[in-house]
Amino acid sequence: FDITTLKKTQEKLALSQKMEAIGLMAGGVAHDLNNILSGVVSYPDLLLMQLPENSKMKKSLEVIKESGQRAAEVVADLLTVAQGIAGSREVRSLNNLICEYLNSPEGTRMLSMYPDIEIKTDLTEDLFNISCSPVHIKKCLMNLLTNAAEAISGTGTIRIETRNQYVDKPVAENQFMKIGEYAVIRIADTGQGIDGEDISHIFEPFYTKKVMGRSGTGLGLAIVWNTIQDHGGAVTVCSDDQGTAFKLYFPITRKNLSTRQGSVSLAQLRGQGESILIVDDEEKQRTIASEMLLALGYRVETAASGEEAVGIVGNQSMDLIILDMIMDPGINGRRTFEQILAVHPDQKAIITSGFSENEEVKKALKLGVSRFIRKPYTMEQLGTTVKKTLARPLV
């Protein structure tokens, strides 16, 4: 009878139960929180469009918008830990993602908080590309670099390295890895290290030695863990009194880099009077989406349920339908789209939800829904998604 094996099994079960409880909590509150935040994130764009350039209100509205987006990011972090990542995949270079983060406003702000810490990079030039969710990779970098900086008292160094590595056996316990080539990031600091009793728990949500609410949410390393697992990779950590080193392994791809689009102006997102049907069981959500799309030059109709939407498209055609996934009571977004396809087989549609991209959303995408957009969304996010969907040729 192996006591060690039993203890490890019990620890795995306890962690699994903890993750399940967090998942239930996140699922219960995220949808409502994101709906509440929709007004805070979306209305500043509408108001900013109506204000003159020299208005004193512009700065205040931009602060409100940024605060709403930061609150939405906290909800997104909770969903990442509970349900996995929800983000479109792109073929990217880890080297580019590292440079983009370090040069971003978030990265430069973080580095400016620690003027006595030197960042050194050693990035392999011929690094293989990976298929990834860029926003989540950058979030991993942010969390690991912040942790590294906070572990250093006074002066110190953080090294960021990238390498190609062939893996033919697991690099860490309890993490499945396929045999093959991996692109690896190593982030090492000269801080005080992590206590031995803590190191086996650091990837658990809310396991933190920081002051909650002042130095993070306790989700940072759990986000790193979930992001790596969802990318089919692995993460290792080594620590002693000379510092800590994290290694992140990502499976490589032979595909070419994705073409990237920069930020666009709202003028570029204007429509040509195309007809759009917004289907959402919450009146506030219908109003927000309607006002944004009307401001962008579209013709808009609304429906409070899937059944009402099916009735509307039975009498007239719409250029695009924006469907909320969860509508209670009544049929959800996916089933609504199924019924609409029976009338208009080439109907273009977008699915939106306050949840992550779950199985129902994936089924809707397989049916022919063009894109998924998570609430709360900005006018740029909605306008870009609508523009791309309308431009997609019928197959």
Image (cartoon, rainbow, N blue to C red):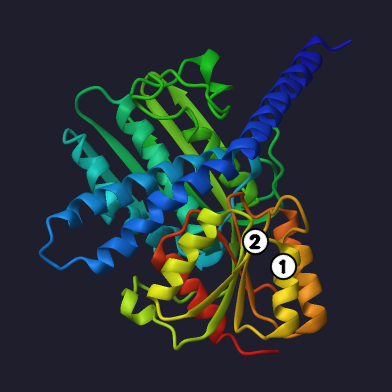
Q: Is residue 124 above or below residue 233?
A: below
Q: What x and y, as percent, mark residue 308?
A: 72, 67
Left/right of residue 137 with respect to residue 308 in the rendered view: left
Q: Nearer the viewer, residue 156 or 112?
A: 112
What residue would you read off at disc 1? 308
Task: Count the numbered circles shown.
Answer: 2
Instruction: Say if residue 355 shows up in the picture.
Output: yes
What amino acid type is highlighted by mark number 2?
A: Ala
Q: Residue at x 75, y 51 (%)?
A: 329
Left/right of residue 221 with respect to residue 42 in the rendered view: right
Q: Is residue 43 above or below residue 170?
A: below
What residue would you read off at disc 2? 304
Q: Are marks 2 and 1 in contact (CB under 8 Å)?
A: yes
Q: Nearer the viewer, residue 30 or 9?
A: 30
Quarter-wise, where is residue 169 in the image? top right
Q: What x and y, as percent, mark residue 314?
A: 75, 81
Q: Residue at x 33, y 64 (%)?
A: 46
Q: What x and y, as percent, mark residue 261?
A: 40, 74
Q: Disc 2 to disc 1, how far (Cα)?
A: 7 Å
Q: Residue at x 44, y 84 (%)?
A: 271
Quarter-wise, where is residue 301 in the image? bottom right
Circle 1 SS class:
helix
Q: Is residue 130 above or below residue 36?
A: below
Residue lying furthest right: 1
Quarter-wise, where is residue 16 in the image? top right
Which numbered circle lies on residue 174?
none
Q: Is residue 229 above or below residue 341?
A: above
What amino acid type is highlighted by mark number 1?
A: Glu
Q: How would you rate the neighbour count of disc 1 (Cα within 10 Å): few for under 14, some for 14-19, many for 20 or more?
A: some
Which quarter of the rendered picture does the N terminus lie within?
top right
Q: What x and y, as percent, mark residue 20?
A: 71, 31
